[in-house]
Image: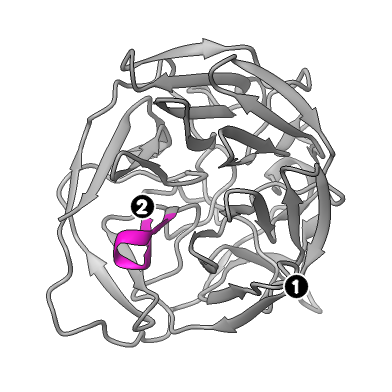
């Protein structure tokens, strides 16, 4: 993901979102917010997170991320595991690679959690996208190196289909965004290219999957100009993709009505099968560098409330809730009928160790 130190200072242009189709006449569901799980042992943001059921236990795993100092020296390779039996977090071996990194992606399949890529930052600010794929067994607490990504990406959306295939949607590669959808087969340890995204290539977008239907929104694209350096711009777009039952490389992408309000950067999102929808929580309306300072030079703040996309009606509901908002997430984690944000940044770019539970009521 781009930073200030490796290029001419860039200024983001915020597009105003188009009016969205009104949701169903019924009142939106309430979203209850509480702290159900113990906090992380360490405050961390921009960490890759996922949950998995293995044996009789449920696990939540956090990989990599950024510590409270928010400098290049504060990037982490840490692995933290929450065990539903002990009801506590413990630290496992670091993510292999001998380097802390940001904007990794994580997803689970068949009893394991997979962590993909991310980018490293050196002391001069240079950022490099990494190709690594690792499978993590939460019971044995061990990593296994798997086939590297064909095109290393960070800040991509990761979703799991059929408890076997993990799709990485768009993202950043070294010097620019890619429109690729890369599919990883966890059983055969093999990558193929799926149908590319139809809209702008983006990083920092958010999305989820229900059944064979992917929904993703927002993110940041590159705008090129004749008379000045390129800008990073927030993208007010949402897309729905249906994975073909016969050939999972084929995705029928189409645009859907945009959600109310401005684009949000690095929301937490996940599919909610119980309502056949995708839930988006938090994020920021001002895209920012990894330290939480916007590309426009203004400190970014988390956005309040949540958004629920109904796949059946292809409409949006805005859900307000009481409690602190957060941003800088890499996913919304399903856990025992609830959805979790794990760490992130709270108000004033404060890195947090809080694990917040959300439940639709």
> In the rendered image, which residue does mark 1 sit on?
195
4 relative to 279, above or below: above
Mark 1 or mark 2: which comes first in sequence? 1
Q: Position of residue 181 (x, y in %)?
A: 73, 63
Q: Main secondary structure of the magenta part?
A: strand
Which residue is located at x 33 percent, y 55 percent?
303
Q: Is residue 353 left or right of residue 23?
A: right
Q: From the image, state whether disc 1 or disc 2 is nearer to you.
A: 1
Measured in 3D between alpha carbons, the distance from the residue under mark 1 to the one under mark 2, in whole angstroms, is 29 Å
192 relative to 94, above or below: below
Q: Is residue 338 left or right of residue 173?
A: left
Start and end of the magenta stretch? 270-280
Q: Position of residue 238 (x, y in %)?
A: 51, 75
Q: Is 214 one of the magenta-colored residues?
A: no
97 relative to 114, above or below: above
Question: Neighbour class for label 1 at 10 Å: few (<14), some, many (≥20)?
Answer: some
Which residue is located at x 47 percent, y 26 percent?
55
Q: Position of residue 171 (x, y in %)?
A: 69, 56
Q: Is residue 89 left or right of residue 125?
A: left
Q: Is residue 206 left or right of residue 7?
A: left
Which residue is located at x 77 percent, y 66 percent?
229
The quarter holding residue 129 reads top right
* Residue in front for this viewpoint, 329 or 136: 136
Mark 1–mark 2 contact, CB under 8 Å?
no
Question: Neighbour class for label 2 at 10 Å: few (<14), some, many (≥20)?
Answer: many
> In the rendered image, which residue does mark 2 sit on?
282
Mark 2: secondary structure: loop
């Amino acid at each position: 993901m781009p930073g200030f130190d490796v290029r001419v200072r860039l200024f983001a242009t915020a597009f105003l979102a188009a009016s969205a189709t009104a949701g169903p006449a019924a009142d939106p569901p309430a979203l209850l917010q509480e702290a159900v799980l113990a906090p992380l042992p360490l405050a961390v943001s921009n960490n890759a997170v996922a949950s998995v059921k293995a044996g009789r236990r449920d696990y939540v795993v956090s990989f990599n991320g950024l510590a409270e100092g928010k400098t290049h020296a504060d990037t982490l390779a840490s692995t933290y595991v929450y065990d539903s039996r002990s009801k506590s977090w413990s630290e496992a071996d670091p993510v292999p690679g001998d380097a802390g990194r940001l904007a990794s992606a994580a997803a689970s399949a068949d009893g394991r959690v997979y962590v993909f890529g991310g980018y490293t930052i050196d002391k001069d600010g240079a950022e490099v996208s990494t190709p690594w794929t690792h499978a993590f067994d939460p019971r044995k607490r061990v990593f296994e190196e798997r086939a590297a990504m064909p095109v290393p990406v960070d800040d991509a959306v990761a979703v799991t289909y059929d408890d076997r295939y993990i799709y990485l949607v768009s993202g950043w590669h070294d010097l620019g965004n890619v429109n690729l959808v890369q599919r990883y087969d966890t059983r055969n340890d093999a990558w193929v290219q799926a149908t590319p995204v139809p809209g702008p290539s983006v990083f920092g977008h958010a999305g989820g999957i229900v059944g064979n239907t992917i929904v993703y929104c927002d993110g940041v694209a590159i705008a090129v100009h004749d008379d000045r350096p390129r800008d990073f711009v927030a993208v007010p777009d949402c897309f729905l993709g249906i994975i073909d039952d016969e050939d999972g490389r084929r995705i029928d992408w189409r645009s859907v009505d945009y959600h109310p309000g401005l684009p949000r950067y690095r929301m937490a999102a996940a599919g909610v099968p119980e309502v056949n929808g995708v839930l988006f929580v938090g994020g920021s309306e001002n895209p920012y560098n990894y330290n939480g300072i916007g590309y426009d030079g203004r400190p970014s703040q988390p956005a309040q409330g949540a958004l629920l996309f109904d796949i059946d009606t292809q409409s949006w509901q805005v859900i307000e809730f009481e409690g602190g908002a957060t941003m800088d997430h890499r996913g919304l984690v399903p856990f025992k009928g609830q959805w979790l944000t794990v760490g992130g940044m709270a108000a004033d770019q404060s890195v947090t160790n809080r694990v917040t539970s959300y439940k639709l009521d």
